Image (cartoon, grey):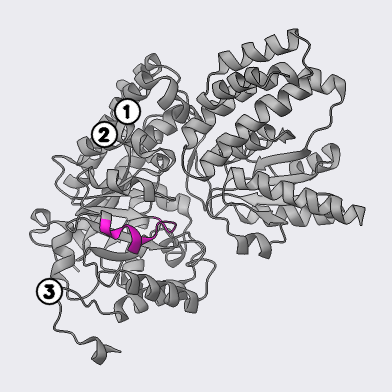
Amino acid sequence: MPSEEFKEMQDALEAGNATVVRTLTEKALERGVDPQVILNEGLIPAMGRVGEKFKRNEVYVPEVLVAARAMYAGLDVLRPLLAKSGAKRAGKMVIGTVKGDLHDIGKNLVRMMFEGAGFEVVDLGTDVSEKRFVEAVRSENPDFLGMSALLTTTMPAMKTTIDALKEAGLRESVKVLVGGAPITHRYARDIGADGYAPDASSAVDLAKELLGQASSSAAS
Amino acid sequence: MRRPVAGMRQEKLIDLVRRSPQRLVFPLMGYPGARLTGSTLRQNGFNAELHFMSICKLVERFSPDAAFFMMDLSLEAGALGLPVRYPINESPTVEEHPVKSLADLDQFKVLDPLNDARIRSFIRVMELMSKNLDIPRGGYVTGPFTLAGLMMGASELAMATIIDSGLVHGVLEFSLGVCKRYARALAEAGADIVAILEPTAAFLSDGAFRTFCGPYIRHLIEDMDPMMVLHICGNTSHLVKEMCKTGAQGLSLDAPVDFPSIAGDVDPDVVLIGNIDPVGIMVQGTPHDVRRAVKDLIDGMASHQNFILSTGCDLPLETPFENIEAFMEEGRRCVRVCDGHATLDPAMMA
């Protein structure tokens, strides 16, 4: 498929031009391009580049949010088609901000980066109780559970959720990733999480790494 | 303890630092005081006398070089009538962010935020601190950009800086007015220091800060009597030069900023305030960890006089008291040795 067209789509995505991304996505579909190809060769590499630039402080939160909005303009067109074709996704994540915490910008960035990397993400929103996290892990059977907290007073809810997963017999079925301003590697380790990432883009790298480990250990 | 600080208003923060024979040491702490009065954060947020007592108890116990009341980023937004949740022992949070257009601002323009009971309560705390404490007394005001973020939603504000700058400037003009009115009231209540809290600006590039944040901070600072400090949480290393242009007398910066490496970018008359990690070290660390972090920071800043040892952000309620003690002791133990204080022989102090 002409990489030129994807280049235009990618440039529009990086510049945050939602209308152009949507139009180019629709045009590609009209020409019969596979939705999975549009996702994998158009949207995902562009969002990945935005994430890399974000990690290197070349762009900041506003640029990422606007790029993500453009990505969703394309993804929303593709989503029903992808679902119909049963296309394989990079992985699945359930994500939410923990109980008592209404901050969503960090959680949203992580969701966007995961969707931008081809993951399926179920977003439970903010102020999510242990019970809702556990229920979602049970019903969605995700590869990852992502929890976010901005407040030191709400971060203990991460541990109680992990404990609730254990009690429900679901802890081994999912990798738990945690993040947020007050969270550290040490805290993540202490509460028994599988991983911590300092920013949204690194969280995707971490998830891919954990998936790689899982598949290589399954193969061996 | 009724000893007013004479002539404080004419003095700048850097003068206070230079005049002191020792490093000035004050953690940003308010919340842990609630444990000393056996009260909840919510009770303190609504009861000026109790709030003042909590601060007093902290001052008595730890003898910091300045005292601040409790941080509350929902205060101004709540005074405008935005829905706020008041948990028992967490900081209040704004629940809805209704401003989507300039027309949405009209409903707020008729309000005087100073009529709000909680704003009045915080002004009263400032008065009580001013009348009864003999160290510099500080209060906080939410910054115009952060207040705009609470009114619009932080994500929406962030995107609007790129796709609808007219809306952003309109909301900022309004929020600046609210911030100014409250800051003036704190000044009249006797605040020696007012720290502008601008955490939402941390996600801006330096260019966007220059357009959407710096100019409004500068307006807020000009004509204000108290020593004006700018506090931004998170990693703000890329914003330090811009923050210096706001006219702030002090920059209170968070733990991710490497003080020794940015100190050269800061005007020697602007005081760097910080920046021990309030959670990783002060809550989760041991007193030994605290002492080591404090010593490393003081050593790193040895050649810079414009420095006050503090925490990167407000200390959480559950901060162990022995860690605050370790912070104060280690901070005071490390005697400053730099220009103008060369009379102390470091070898003798070791």
Camera-nearest label, 3 or 1: 3
Is-magenta flag for residue B255? yes
Which chain letter goes with mark 2? B
The residue beneath circle 3 is B340
Which numbered marker is on residue B216? 2
Q: What stretch is highlighted in magenta?
A: B254-264
Residue at 37 percent across and 16 percent down: it is B102
Residue closest to the far bottom: B348
B186 or B43, which lies in front? Answer: B186
Residues tagged by mark 3 and mark 1 found on one chain of the structure? yes
Indicate left or right for B173 with A162 as reference.
left
Q: Where is residue A189 in the image (x, y as percent from the top left)?
A: 67, 63
Residue at 79 percent across and 48 percent down: it is A211
Residues tagged by mark 1 and mark 2 found on one chain of the structure? yes
Say if mark 1 contacts mark 2, CB within 8 Å. yes
Q: Where is residue A140 in the image (x, y as percent from the top left)?
A: 83, 37
Indicate left or right for B9 with B179 as reference.
left
Which chain letter goes with mark 3? B
In which quadrant of the rendered view does residue B343 lie?
A: bottom left
Q: What residue type is labelled 2?
A: Tyr
Crowd around label 3: few <14 · some 14–19 · many ≥20 (10 Å): few
- Check the image and report above or below for B276 versus A57: below
In which quadrant of the rendered view does residue B162 lie?
A: top left
A148 or A59, which lies in front? Answer: A59
Q: Which amino acid does label 3 sit on?
A: Gly
Say if mark 2 contacts mark 3, CB within 8 Å. no
The residue beneath circle 1 is B172
Camera-nearest label, 2 or 3: 3
SS category of the residue bearing label 2: helix
Crowd around label 1: few <14 · some 14–19 · many ≥20 (10 Å): many
Indicate left or right for A185 with B347 as reference.
right
Which numbered marker is on residue B224? none
